[in-house]
Amino acid sequence: MEDRSTSHGNLLLHPGRSMANRSKEPQWNQEEGSLRLFLRGRALNFYGPSDLTDYNISKQADAPSETLQLEWVYGYRGRDCRSNLYYLPTGEIIYFTAAVVVLHNVEEQTQRHYLGHTDDIKCLAIHPDKIKIATGQVAGHELRETKPQAKKKSAAPDESLPHVRVWDSVSLNTLHVIGLGVFNRSVCCLSFSKLDVGQQLVIVDEANEHIMTVWDISKEKPHKIAETKSSGDPVLAVEYHPLEKNQIVCCGKGQISFWTLEGGSLAKKQGIFDKYEKPKYILCLAFADNGDVLSGDSNGNIFVWGRGSQRIINAKLAAHDGGVFSLCVLKDGNLISGGGKDRKIIQWDNTYNKTGPETELPEAYGPVRTLSQGKGGLILVGTTKNCILHGSLDLEFSLIVQGHTDELWGLASHPSQHQFLTCGSDKQLFLWDTQSRSVVWNKEMNDAIHSCCFHPRGGIVAVGTSVARWLVLDLATREIISVHTDGNEQIECIQYSPDGSMIAVGSRDNYIYVYSVSEDGKKYSKIGRCSGHSSFVTHVDWSEDNQYLTSNSGDYEILFWTASSCKMLTNTQVIKDIKWATQNCVLAFNTVGIWPEGVDGTDINGCCKSHNERFLVSCDDFGKVNLFSYPAIQPRSACHSYKGHSSHVTSVSFLFDDSRLISTGGKDTAVLQWQVV
C-alpha cells in the first residue's frame, strides 16, 4: 500500500511534521485548487471542484437570510429533577428539558418556549401570582470550556455562570437575572415567599455546603438579604411556608430543617424524629390546608409535622413500597402521594386515611417523579423515565410527553414523509411524526443503539448498535428482518446509497463495511471492507451516482473510496468533481466554513445540507445548532447560532421537504424541532 502520509487520498499532511514556523491561517493553493486548513496542529487539504473560479480565501461568506425558529420540544427532564411540572392559568403546563422551559397547551397542541438560559435548567418555581416564573441553571458551556486563568480576566460575570432567571410567563420577557458570580456549581432548588405575595425568593446552591440565600425581588434590582450554610449533604427541596411568615422548610439527605428569617439572618431548627426511624433521605415536601408540613421519605413513610413545630404529630408508615417521591395537596384538601419503587399514586383524606382507588403506572412510563394539580380535577404526573401523563385516579392516565432517558446519538429523517427516527443508549428506537408532534411508535432493542438510517424507499430502516451488530427493521411491522455483525466495536454511522442498492456501515474498529442490498432492502450480501483509516470512522457520505464513498475519522482523516471494490481512491482529479448526495462529513471542502478559529476537531459533532442545497447546519459541543449558507467554502463563514440544547448536540437532519430541521442532544436527551422561516 502507498505511503498514506503523502497520499492525496486522505488529503492530510502528516501530523508529525513540525509546523512551528508555518502560519496557521487557512491557505489557498491556486495551482492545485486546494485549501489548507489547520485543525489541532494538523494540516488538512481540501480540493475544490474544477469549475471553481475566482475563489478568494479572504472573502466573507454571509449567513443565510432565512432563520430557524424553535417549533417543538420532545422531552421532559424527570429522570433527576423534582417539582418541575405545573399547570398555569394560561391553560398551559410548564416544565423544562435541556436549556428550554416549555409552556405546553395540551388541548390546543401548541408550545411556547422560554430560551433565556445558557445550559441545563435544574429547578423551577411558580410565583403566587401564577404569572412570574423562576428557573435556575448549572454552570454553562462557556464557563466549563474556558481555562481558569482566562475566566479571571472577564470584566463582569457572564450568563454562563450558574444563576436564576425570573421571567413573565405571558410575555416570556426576563424580569431579573439573580446570582451571577454568587452561586458555585448550580442552583438545585428555589421557592417564592407566599404571605407577602412573592416579594422574596429563597435559593439553594448545589455547592458542597449548599448555601441558602434569600433575595428581595420586589425592587427593579434584586438584592440578597440573608445567606447561610444549609447542609453538607444534598438538599432536594426548599419551600416557603404558605401560612407562617418568614418560615422556610428544606429537606434532603438525612434531614428536614425549619428556618426562620429574622433581621437578615436565618435561624435553623432540625426536625426531630423521636421514636421514628430517621430515613436516609427526605425526598419531598407539601403543606396541608391547616399549615401542617408533610414530608415523604426514602423509607416509604409520610410524616406530618405540626404547624410551627419541628416534631411529628402524625405518621403514615410504609405508605409506599420504596421511596415517596412526590406529595401534592389538591384543591379539595385531599393529599396524593407518588411512589418510586411501586409506581403507585395513592390518595389520602385530610385525616391522612387512604381514600379512593390506587393507581399504578405502567412500567414503561417509570416511577412517579412529581405530582401536581392539573386543569379541573385532573392530576399531572412526571415520571423518572421522562414522561408526562395526565388523568385522574378513577380514570386512566394518558400520555402527553414521552422521550429518551439516556444519551442520544442516532437521527434519521424519512425520505418522503414528515417523520424521523431517533435512537440512543436507552436501547429505545422512536419513530416521531412532526405534524402531529407525537410518537408514532417506540421499540426497545436488546442493546444500546448509536446510529440509524432509512432505505430510500422509506419502508425499511437500519440501526447500528454499540456491540458491533446492525439490524434491519420493517417500518410497518417493526419486525427485525435482518441481523449482521461486523467487527467487535460500536457501529458509528450507517448509510444507504441514494438508489438503495448498497449500504455502508462505519465502525469504531476503523473499517467501513459495504453490502449490496436487494429485494427492496430485505436482502444483504457483503461486498467488502474499506481499510485505511487509522482511527474510528465518524461520518460517511455517498456520491449521487452511487459509485463512491467519502469518510471522516476520529483523527480528522478524509478518505475516498470506490464503493464496488472498497478500494481507496487517490486521484484528486476524480475526487474534486464528485457530486455528493448528502453532507454528513464535517470535514469536506463544502464544510470548511463551519470550523471556527481555534476549535478542537472533536467540537463539531455533525452536519447536514438541505435537500435544495441552500443550507448547511452544524451541531457542536457547546449546545449550539448553527445555520450556514451552502456550500460553506469560505473559512469561518458567518452563521446563525441557536441555543436550546444544554449538552453536546449530537446530530442534525433536515426533513425531506426542508421545511424543518431536527436536532438531538446527547446527555440532555432532548429532541428539538426547528422551523425554517
Image (spheres, rainbow, N blue to C red):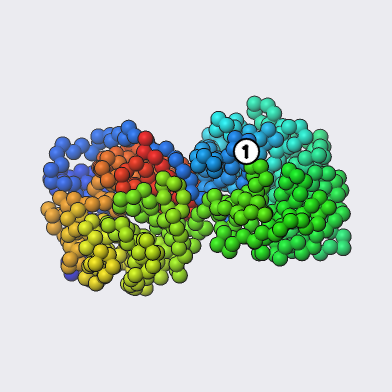
Q: Residue at x 26, y 70 (%)?
A: 524
> Foreground residue, 163 or 117?
117
Q: Where does the image place residue 54, in percent across and percent down from the top left?
A: 16, 36
Position above or below: 642 against 427 = above
Which of the 4 image quadrants contains residue 10? bottom left
Q: As drawn, is 155 to the left or to the right of 255?
A: left
Q: Quadrant of the N terminus?
A: bottom left
Q: Is residue 676 visible?
A: yes
Measured as percent of width and height from the top left, residue 494 is found at 32, 61
- Within 10 Å of the Cα at label 1, are there few (<14), some (14-19), or many (20+) other Cα atoms? some
Who's the residue at 41% across and 45% down the image? 435
- The residue wearing badge 1 is 88
Q: Residue at x 32, y 59 (%)?
A: 459
Residue 320 picture location, percent across and down: 72, 62
Q: Which of the image's four quarters has the C terminus?
A: top left
Q: Is residue 462 above or below residue 525?
A: above
Residue drawn where x is 27% and y is 46% of the image: 611
> Residue 140 location, x and y as percent?
52, 45
Observer-nearest residue: 59 or 453?
Answer: 453
